[in-house]
């Protein structure tokens, strides 16, 4: 199709503002799907996406639409994830578009991820179409939300479209706005080819399939192509466009969105954000914005039954084929046996991977306390990356430790600022400023150590603000921190899976609470169990699980007291021997309970 009849757009919104439902209505109205074929969240093809009501993996689809001017247009929708963990994927999909439909819930209003994704769209010079969704709700505050959008965007009131994606009301006006307001894609088909990879998937029979937006030039099957970040070359086997299922074509030209199959065996070769060019007439510069996706949160994953280790390895290999941001390597724990150290983009990503492993591959898993990567500098100023507390050296060899920091934006109604600020101080937040969006809502700007927000920060924030506050962040780098390795010992033996790296000021409180939790969870033995929290060789907290005691003197009625004493001494010796030989089993609930330590 001619370039002036193409429109590339995406839908951006906070979680649960109706992005996927609006996509459903667009597909239905354009006739891409019939009513019989339709189901809710049709683009979210994972069970997890449907259950949680979130988009985890981005999707693309082409719709044909006959506008009011009688002309036919090809509308390429690139659906994006809405969670902060997947911000990089969102930024690449925005780079593949010329316009964005900004969806705001009529009941909830503008939230943190709305603002964050909007700024990303503005950075990419996209045409913004503001839409207020869910106007059919009894709790809809349309006039109030209009003012929020006007103050955020600086647009006119008549530019804001009102829709109900559930009923279909107003959705046609969104399609007309996409055609009339979003400019057609630029780029010259005669220039050297540059195609942006905005997503990739793995197919068992075809290998890695790259989803691309052709920025300049064209791609034709049979020619040799090159991935510019890795320098790898492949013969292009097939190109095509998206419908429900991929439709093969003879060529992809500048401005078009489609898929590329080139025999790449791994999604690591088709990295999101990379540039594809041709070997014969290569481009001199790749497209800007590419970076390698690095895991931010690390956790050990172990099968609860050691026999399932190979099954876990196989499952991780299969998941890795479809998710290049997942990192894993073998790990051995004294407490949990053989497993894998896994790296994730964030806590939601970790939760999703664990749930998919348990659900799709029928595995029963134990995961260790999530932690972040630290940069350890020794006396020679050499830097070592450590993502497992058990690998941290003793304090004598360390010159300084640097921890990752994030820049956070907390969007909240003004009345809850007084509740949120003490929480931010408790989590070592560095305050920057407060920005008022209007008379009732403000954005608090903070820097936080990432380790302080990966546990229950979001839950605490929601409860302190009665569910109204929302949270968004970006990684800003590593800074020195006064952190220490806290070990948990059972009868003098370290339980490596329970080791954590915490700030020195919080170490005593953390150690005390973990010891108290373990005392409740570890079953009583025939001998006394000492639970200790220690920094290096210094014990800072202790709890004791009392021994089960058999009444060995029950049969002694009357007689000399020395007989009873002899039996008690014998019992005492037996318990001492048992303690030397006995091994305390840490129950699985203990690892989960650590996450609930305040």
Image (spheres, helix red, strand yellow):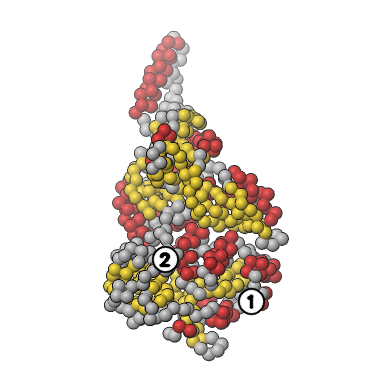
- Tell me where residue 382 sits by quadrant: top left
With respect to residue 379, does 465 lie above or below? below
211 on left or right of 97? left
In the picture as drawn, the residue positioned furthest to the front comes out as 284
- Which element carries disc 1, helix, strand or loop? helix
- Residue picked out by circle 1: 159
Label 1 neighbour load within 10 Å: few <14, some 14-19, many 20+ = few
**Does the image show residue 359?**
no
Seen from the viewer's position, the closer of residues 219 and 389 is: 219
Q: Residue at x 32, y 75 (%)?
A: 281
Q: In front of the other: label 2 or label 1?
A: 2
Label 2 neighbour load within 10 Å: few <14, some 14-19, many 20+ = many
Give the CA separation, mark 2 to mark 1: 32 Å
- Residue picked out by circle 2: 273
User: Which disc is residue 560 wearing?
Assistant: none
In the picture as drawn, the residue positioned furthest to the bottom comes out as 70
Question: Residue 401, percent across and down?
Answer: 46, 41
Question: Residue 355, percent across and down?
Answer: 43, 56
């Amino acid at each position: 199709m001619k370039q002036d009849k193409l429109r590339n757009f995406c839908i951006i919104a906070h979680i649960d503002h109706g992005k996927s439902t609006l996509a459903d209505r667009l597909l239905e109205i354009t006739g891409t799907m019939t009513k019989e074929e339709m189901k809710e969240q049709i683009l979210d093809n994972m069970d997890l996406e449907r259950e949680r009501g979130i988009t985890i993996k981005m999707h693309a689809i082409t719709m044909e639409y006959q506008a009011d001017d009688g002309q036919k247009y090809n509308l390429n929708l690139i659906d994006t994830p809405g969670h902060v963990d997947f911000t990089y994927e969102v930024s690449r999909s925005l780079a593949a578009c010329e316009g964005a439909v900004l969806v705001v819930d009529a009941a909830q209003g503008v939230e943190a991820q709305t603002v964050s994704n909007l700024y990303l769209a503005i950075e990419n010079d996209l045409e913004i179409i503001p839409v207020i969704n869910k106007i059919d709700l009894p709790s809809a505050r349309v006039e109030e939300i209009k003012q929020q959008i006007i103050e955020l965007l600086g647009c006119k009131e008549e530019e804001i479209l009102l829709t109900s994606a559930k009923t279909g009301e107003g959705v046609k006006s969104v399609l007309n706005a996409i055609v009339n307001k979003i400019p057609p894609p630029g780029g010259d088909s005669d220039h050297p080819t540059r195609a942006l990879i905005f997503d990739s998937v793995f197919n068992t029979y075809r290998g890695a399939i790259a989803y691309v937006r052709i920025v300049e030039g064209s791609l034709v099957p049979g020619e040799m192509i090159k991935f510019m970040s890795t320098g790898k070359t492949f013969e292009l086997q097939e190109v095509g466009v998206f419908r429900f299922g991929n439709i093969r074509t003879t060529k992809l030209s500048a401005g078009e969105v489609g898929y590329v199959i080139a025999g790449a065996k791994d999604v690591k070769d088709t990295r999101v954000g990379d540039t594809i060019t041709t070997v014969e007439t290569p481009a001199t510069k790749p497209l800007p914005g590419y970076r390698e996706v690095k895991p931010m949160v690390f956790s050990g994953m172990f099968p609860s039954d050691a026999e399932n280790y190979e099954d876990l390895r196989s499952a991780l290999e299969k998941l890795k084929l479809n998710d290049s941001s997942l990192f894993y390597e073998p790990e051995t724990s004294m407490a949990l046996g053989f497993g894998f150290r896994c790296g994730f983009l964030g806590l939601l990503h970790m939760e999703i991977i664990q749930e998919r492993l348990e659900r799709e591959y029928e595995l029963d898993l134990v995961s260790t306390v999530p932690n972040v990567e630290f940069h350890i500098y020794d006396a020679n100023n050499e830097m070592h990356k450590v993502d497992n507390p058990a690998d941290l050296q003793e304090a004598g060899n360390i010159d300084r430790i640097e921890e990752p920091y994030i820049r956070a934006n907390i969007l909240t109604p003004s009345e809850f600022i007084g509740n949120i600020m003490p929480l931010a101080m408790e989590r070592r937040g560095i305050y920057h400023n407060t920005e008022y969006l209007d008379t009732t809502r403000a954005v608090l700007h903070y820097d936080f150590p990432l380790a302080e927000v990966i546990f229950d920060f979001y839950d605490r924030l929601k409860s302190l603000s009665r569910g109204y506050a929302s949270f968004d962040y970006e990684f800003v780098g590593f800074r020195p921190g006064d952190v220490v390795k806290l070990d948990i010992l059972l009868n003098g033996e370290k339980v490596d899976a329970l080791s954590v790296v915490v700030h020195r000021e919080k170490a005593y409180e953390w150690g005390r609470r973990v010891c108290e939790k373990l005392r409740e969870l570890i079953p009583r033995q025939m001998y006394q169990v000492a639970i200790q929290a220690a920094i290096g060789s210094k014990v800072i907290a202790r709890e004791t699980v009392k021994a089960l005691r058999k009444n060995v003197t029950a049969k002694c009625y009357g007689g000399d007291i020395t007989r009873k004493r002899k039996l008690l001494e014998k019992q005492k010796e037996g318990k001492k021997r048992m303690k030397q030989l006995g091994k305390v089993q840490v129950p699985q609930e203990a690892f989960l309970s650590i996450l609930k330590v305040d």
